[in-house]
Image: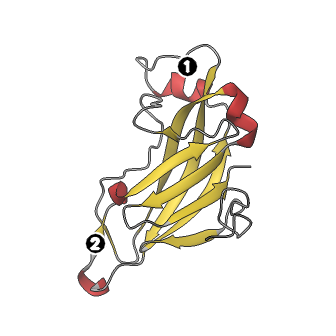
């Protein structure tokens, strides 16, 4: 059993600016915008405002690909990772179901990245405003790795 107080667990998320490896990707949270309503409204005229009691929460993430077994010829994309937010309500927010619309400088999960390549961009969720102060970022892979990052 994993100790919930271990660094990188939900009870003890990694601090902003800390890097860690998630299945060949070195992930770092560069910063967060807890209330990104204005940024989303300005990003695209068709973006809808958040529903009552909700707000847009945006995090800036950097990912560097270190590769797998055949690293010299290896490439991947971030589609293999999930970026999810979770707060005190203990229900995860996903980019698919808690969509913000057109996100400024969005993290391109489909871009092929070769060993040593680095990409960065924003991920965004429509969250319950009551969760804003407690929100952490969960990065998980299909391989089963799961790491939590502080968003403050």
Of the two numbered discs 2 and 1 on the same chain, state the one appearing first in sequence: 1
Corner quadrant of residue 77: bottom left
In percent of the image, x 61 and y 58: which residue is there? 148
In percent of the image, x 57 and y 72: which residue is there? 20
Q: Is residue 131 above or below residue 2?
A: above
- Measured as percent of width and height from the top left, residue 22 is found at 48, 69
- Measured as percent of width and height from the top left, residue 51 is found at 55, 15
Q: Is residue 1 above or below residue 138?
A: below
In the picture, the disc for residue 50 is 1
How many neighbours does mark 1 have within 10 angstroms: few (below 14), some (14-19), or many (20 or more)? many
Q: Residue furthest front?
A: 1
- Residue with the mark numbered 2: 75
How many neighbours does mark 2 have within 10 angstroms: few (below 14), some (14-19), or many (20 or more)? some
Q: CA distance from mark 2 to mark 1?
A: 36 Å
| Residue nearer the viewer, 107 or 130 | 130
Q: Secondary structure at mark 1?
A: loop
In the picture, the disc for residue 112 is none
Q: Is residue 99 above or below residue 123?
A: above
| Residue nearer the viewer, 113 or 20 | 20
**Residue 53 left/right relative to 67:** right
- Measured as percent of width and height from the top left, residue 138 is found at 56, 53
In percent of the image, x 48 and y 28: which residue is there? 43
Q: Which image quarter holds the N terminus?
A: bottom right
Q: Is residue 2 above or below residue 33?
A: below
Numbered marks: total: 2
In percent of the image, x 72 and y 57: which residue is there? 11
| Colour option used | secondary structure
Q: Secondary structure at mark 2?
A: strand
| Residue nearer the viewer, 8 or 90 | 90
Corner quadrant of residue 4: bottom right
């Amino acid at each position: 059993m994993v100790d919930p107080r271990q660094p990188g667990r939900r009870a003890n998320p990694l601090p902003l600016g800390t890097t860690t490896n998630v299945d060949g990707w070195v992930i770092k949270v560069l910063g967060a915008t807890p209330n990104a309503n204005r940024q989303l409204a300005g990003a695209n005229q068709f973006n809808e405002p958040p529903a009552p009691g909700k707000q847009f929460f945006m995090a800036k993430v950097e990912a560097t690909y270190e590769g797998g077994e055949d690293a010299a010829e290896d490439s991947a994309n971030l589609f293999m990772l999930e970026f999810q937010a979770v707060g005190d309500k203990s229900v995860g927010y996903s980019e698919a179901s808690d969509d913000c619309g057109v996100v400024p400088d969005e993290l391109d999960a489909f871009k092929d990245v070769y060993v040593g390549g680095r990409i960065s961009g924003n991920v965004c969720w429509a969250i319950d405003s009551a969760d804003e102060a407690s929100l952490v970022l969960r990065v998980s892979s299909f391989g089963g790795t799961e790491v939590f990052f502080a968003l403050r």
